[in-house]
Amino acid sequence: MSTFEETLKPHIDPRWSFGVTVGCPKGWEQLVLDAHAKLVETDPEYKIMQIKEKFGGLRFYVAHKDYEAAEEAIRPAEIASYETCDTCGTKENVSTATLGEGFYWVLTLCDSCRATSLANAQARKAALDAEYGDDEEDE
């Protein structure tokens, strides 16, 4: 278990996590840890319901005794996620978009990680097309 997971584990609400550890892209771990530290300051017993990526941004859902304090802790991390590469954590040359035509998942990536992700996605698609046939033939 990583330090990231160990830090958050005591705050994971077992009713919602179904035994699954909380994860997020490596590049956003510090954003989550910063929000976590602020949440613990205002409510040491707060619980994490869910942490995820949605539409290229970080989403952080918690049970906290003070809604406004929780929002103040979480909102900066969610905003910063749109300016931070979810893979490497850089803030340089970052954009939020799909990988291109035929790829529909929205990601926040720097130019370098976007190029690597696109190459990997194209290779996976080519391998699947070779094994199962091209999706366009089904249309």
Image (spheres, rainbow, N blue to C red):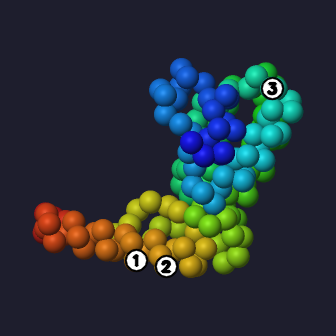
**Amino acid found under the numbered disc labelled 2:** Ala
Give the quarter of the image for residue 22. Answer: top right
Looking at the picture, which amino acid does disc 1 mark? Ala
Which quadrant does the N terminus fall into?
A: top right
Mark 3: secondary structure: loop
Picture disc at residue 115: 2
Query: Is 111 on the left-hand or right-hand side of 30?
Result: left
Q: Distance from label 2 to label 1 (Cα)?
A: 6 Å
Look at the numbered discs 2 and 3 and tell me whether their residues touch, using CB distance below 8 Å: no
Contact between marks 2 and 1 (CB within 8 A): the answer is: yes
Amino acid residing under circle 3: Pro
Residue 64: x %, y % from top left: 75, 25
Tag in front: 2 or 3: 3
At horizontal 21% and vertical 66% (from top left) the residue drawn is 128
- Say which residue label 1 marks: 119
Q: Does residue 6 appear in this view?
A: yes
- Residue wearing tag 3: 44
The percent coordinates of residue 125 (x first, y second) are 28, 69
